[in-house]
Amino acid sequence: MSVNLTADTPIITSLLDNDLYKFTMLQTMLHQFPQTHGVYRFRCRNNHQTVYPLGEIKADLERQLDDLCQLRFTQDELDYLRGLRFIKSDFVDYLELFSLKRRFITVSTDENNFLNVDIEGPMIQAMFFEIFVLCIISELYYRRLANDEIIAEGQRRLDEKITLLHQYHQEQSGQNISPEQAFTVTDFGTRRRFSKAWHYHVVKSLHEACPQIVRGTSNVYLAKSLGITPIGTMAHEFMQAFQALDVRLRDSQKAALECWVREYRGDLGIALTDVVGMDAFLRDFDLYFAKLFDGLRHDSGDPYEWGDKAIAHYHQLKIDPKTKVLTFSDGLTLQKAWDLHQYFAGRIKTGFGIGTNLTNDMGVTQLNIVLKLVACNGQPVAKISDSPGKTMIDDDTYLAYLKQVFEIKE
């Protein structure tokens, strides 16, 4: 695989090269809250561990964003989206006219030559930038480091993963497990991938090696190109936005879940639980929602404790947990996913979304980069994660208020 790409080579060449949940959230916002205004902010959580300051790629990033904002959906891509059951025809009509507007995104550096990216504008524009910006930054950073040795190490680690998949498949085959109870993995690695080409190579290799386990990808372009299933529902920004929409703050989670149900009416039924922590989420996830949603997604905190809480909650509501699914997506490796699957086997269905460890396991330090919604309709919003260090907000007063409203202890 070539590593001789220049900084000027466009990274994003298709607007379909994005995660499915960006499309599903965008459709919902367009239909129900089209005038919502959002502010997003970039952060590298490990700035002090990078080989060189991210500010050095500022000029290259600016050029890449110029290219990104020239892209349009092709007819072939629109036809593919129309073929997804949960995508509405009027939304595809909107995408036919869609392009990202350069005026909504600005790039700067600080006194440490750390990179700042700010996005501000209508959420039906602003929310679609996130994945593109993150994978552009990631690829620009690694283009300066890439060499044949790093690629060879990445391939060696990929081969080890394929060996593991074959091992898991053999173990599973001897247990007479139903397809619903089987161990399955989805690629969630777009945002922090080593490169677009490497991402394609990894997903293609893993799927071809073990299609019984690696069944899908969050990346719509790869799903279309490889003929596999696109996977995704909602992200934190969707739930966070309701903290600033026309509902009581205490009712924001319930309003977000209700909005999702109205839009998809049974499709895409996996709810994200850690916008204000699992305990606060379960207080809102009553019998009504527990019956309407197929399951829950874990993205922070201890996954075993989280899963046990979810199962106990279903039991309390007199719902058989075996009819529901837990999707895990926080910092997973294949081994961690397999161990979780074994732990919950026979108690509840499981699924696993693995990101950076699939698409950027090259033996070099991985960037820990995020681009989060920090304000909506002129007021702050926040995520209070179940893991320390993931909360991102500049307004401590609002954060304290949010904790008080949702009874979150320090």
Image (cartoon, helix red, strand yellow):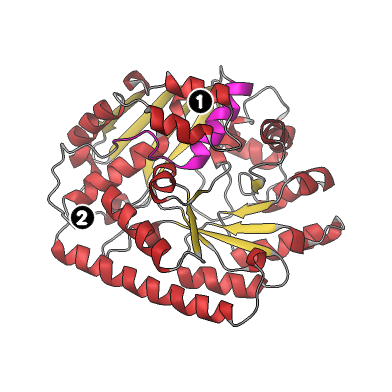
Q: Nearer the viewer, residue 159 or 281?
A: 159
Q: Which residue is mark 2?
A: 51
As helix, strand or loop, the secondary structure at mark 2 comes to loop
Asked if residue 322 lies left or right of residue 191, the reply is: right
Q: Nearer the viewer, mark 1 or mark 2?
A: 1
Q: Is residue 91 above or below residue 274?
A: above
For the magenta stretch, what is the residue range?
13-33
Q: Amino acid at mark 2?
A: Val
Residue 49 image offset from top left, x and y in percent = 28, 56
Q: Nearer the viewer, residue 130 or 281?
A: 130
As helix, strand or loop, the secondary structure at mark 1 comes to helix
Q: Residues within 10 Å of mark 2 (few under 14, many from 20)?
A: few
Asked if residue 20 lies left or right of residue 284, the reply is: left
Q: Is residue 41 above or below residue 320?
A: above
Q: Is residue 41 magenta?
A: no
Q: Is residue 241 above or below residue 272?
A: above
Residue 284 image offset from top left, x and y in percent = 76, 44
Q: Is residue 26 magenta?
A: yes
Occupied quadrant, residue 3: bottom left
Q: Is residue 394 visible in the rendered structure shown here?
A: no
Q: Which mark is residue 92?
A: 1
Question: At x 62% / y 26%, what residue is drawn?
Answer: 244
Occupied quadrant, residue 370: top left
Q: Earlier in the sequence, mark 1 or mark 2?
A: 2
